[in-house]
Amino acid sequence: MTQLDSRPGPGAAVDRRRPARVRTLWILAALAALVLIMIASVAFGSRIVGWADIVAGVRGQTDTLAQAAVVKRIPRTFLAVAVGAALGLAGAVMQGVTRNPLADPGILGVNMGASLAVVTGIVSFGLASAAGYIWVAILGAAVAAVFVYAVGSLGRGGATPLKLALAGAAISAALASLISAFVLPRSDIATGFQSWMIGGVGGASYDSLRLVLPFLAVGFAVSLLSAKALNSLALGDDLAAGLGERVAVTRGVAALGAVLLCGASTAVAGPIAFVGLVVPHFCRLLVGLDHRWLLPFSALIGAALLTAADVVGRVVARPQEIDVGIITALIGAPFFIYFVRRQKVREL
Amino acid sequence: MTATHSLLVSSLRLGYGDRTVIESLDLTLPPGKITAIVGANACGKSTLLRSMSRLLAPRAGHVLLDGREVHKMPAKELARTLGLLPQSPVAPEGITVSDLVGRGRNPHQRLLSRWSREDDAAVAAALDATHTADLADRSVDELSGGQRQRVWIAMALAQQTDLLLLDEPTTFLDVSHQVEVLDLLTDLNRNRGTTIVMVLHDLNMAARYADHLIALADGKLHAAGEPSAVLTEDCVRAVFGLDSQVITDPTSGKPLMLPLGRHHVAITRP
């Protein structure tokens, strides 16, 4: 028990600062990594450019093709950061709300619900404004979240991790077929949809960023303010109520935060899966289970992961680009399989 | 810490779905004492405890804390007066003891408030009182059943409530750990004046540790009072449908129930 040596004596405060120091260090390290990845995201892409062009591009010059490419990478980088942070945070919140280690905006069908809503809006109702996409996507995400949770809660034992994941996968598959049914007959929009459905940040512009940021900001605020309540919910509904939480209300508010994040990011970047699954688990290893640390850290690591995945997708298949949704699936799928194959999927 | 609160239940009816578990119950829980609720399986004792801690809304009647209806009080305000430890709670995987105990501070914290000196002091005191201070940095998963239960009680203590409700705090513990946990609760009651209300399975443990015994049978109050008045052979027959012999426990002077069965009959009658 060497860690107790710093304790001045019985009755004195337990040293809570030591873990806080470790956590602060990890946050700083993650921030540094994110900045480096953002620089890489501006510097590297499917077109190889020199440092002079990068510097000129960052200053806003578009005299050469190389500089123009660099200029386009800047909003793309910011979008990747915003969407990655949103997905990482949404995953952590969903895992907390459902007390389910397999919860993820992709696995629970929330992103697919947002996608179907957008597709339906465009095909059936002639929805054309990007702002409209966001509202519709959030609505679709909310409906899908409620529906999947209701289906997953049916039967004995309530919403167990595996039942919820199965319900999400089944409903995702059904939603994906519906999307295909809507889109395939429309050759005029099918190609654009294909890449959107895979999920990517390549189409980023300052306009799309400006549209989505208010939604993400509200989603971030609501989610981060739920941290303390999620700490109580993690102990079970009875204990959370005993600790003074109104369980149904706090769960609903936190879920709303996650749905805002998922809907808004799906509207601009398509249904990107697995970021929300992998990131919180990785973060728990480093900063522990306290949501007041876990949530912001998940946002940071989510941003770093998605931006890095986007850079990788741009450079591995030059001169082609691989959409970031494919890269995250390549990272996330093996992790998901490993996780499900563990002897016992415990509730969080 | 020693403020005495009155907790009482009047014409309380409780149930799940279309099943009524408790029918018109009136009870007063003596402040500053240890009360044990006993009864056969499914007699409604856990249901009663859940309702007293506002987890279950009454069908009819009231649960009154200091004259106010528990189910209408603000959640956090209630949680600063009345703490609850449910039956066999499950800790999140990998959580450390100090993190878990710290979560007991929730009702004392505002949405944006930071961890305070009082929070630190409350957690340290809870760890000391439950002799878990040297486990503070350990993962709850690694602990033995008895240690784990002490940690949960520490969490409830960090909540610093004057009333503490516990649902079968000794289930799944071997006899030495049962005694350890009940001794700890007695310390709390004697040293801080915490009112303790617990559901207990073991009649003899209940008689030994409780100042006030409540025997429920089929959702109705069978008897309530001092253990020596409540725990009688007639009571055991009425509540559990079991023949028994009740003698005086030579170590505590409290009643001690010896169950009889088809293969054992009473040899001497006191």
Image (cartoon, rainbow, N blue to C red):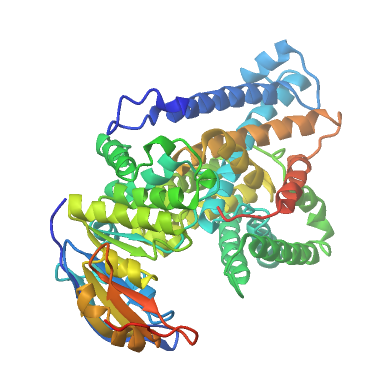
In the rendered image, residue B97, in percent from the top left (x then y), is placed at: 44, 42
Up the image or down, A327 lies above or below A131; here it is above
Depth check: A224 or A99 in front?
A: A99
Quadrant position of residue A311? top right
Q: In which quarter of the image is residue B170?
A: bottom left
**In percent of the image, x 44 and y 48: which residue is there?**
B147
* One can see residue A169 in this view: yes
The residue lying at 77 percent from left, 26 percent from top is A45
The answer to whether residue B202 is left or right of residue A150 is left
Question: With A204 as the anchor, is B241 left or right in this view?
Answer: left
Q: In this view, does A190 lie to the left or right of B110?
A: right
Left or right of B78 in this view: A123: right
* Image position, residue B209 (x, y; %): 27, 63
Return the x and y of residue A156 as percentages of the image width and height.
60, 74
Residue, x 80% and y 20% (percent of image)? A48
The vertical placement of A311 against B81, above or below, is: above
Q: In the rendered picture of this protein, how many numbered marks are placed on residues?
A: 0
Give the answer, above or below, for where A277 lies relative to A29.
Answer: below
- Measured as percent of width and height from the top left, residue B4 is found at 13, 60
Residue B121, compared with residue B23, is above or below; it is: above
Residue A204 sits in which quadrant?
Answer: top right
* Extreme-top residue of the structure: A52
Residue A208 visible in the shown view: no
Front-most of residues B229 and A227: B229
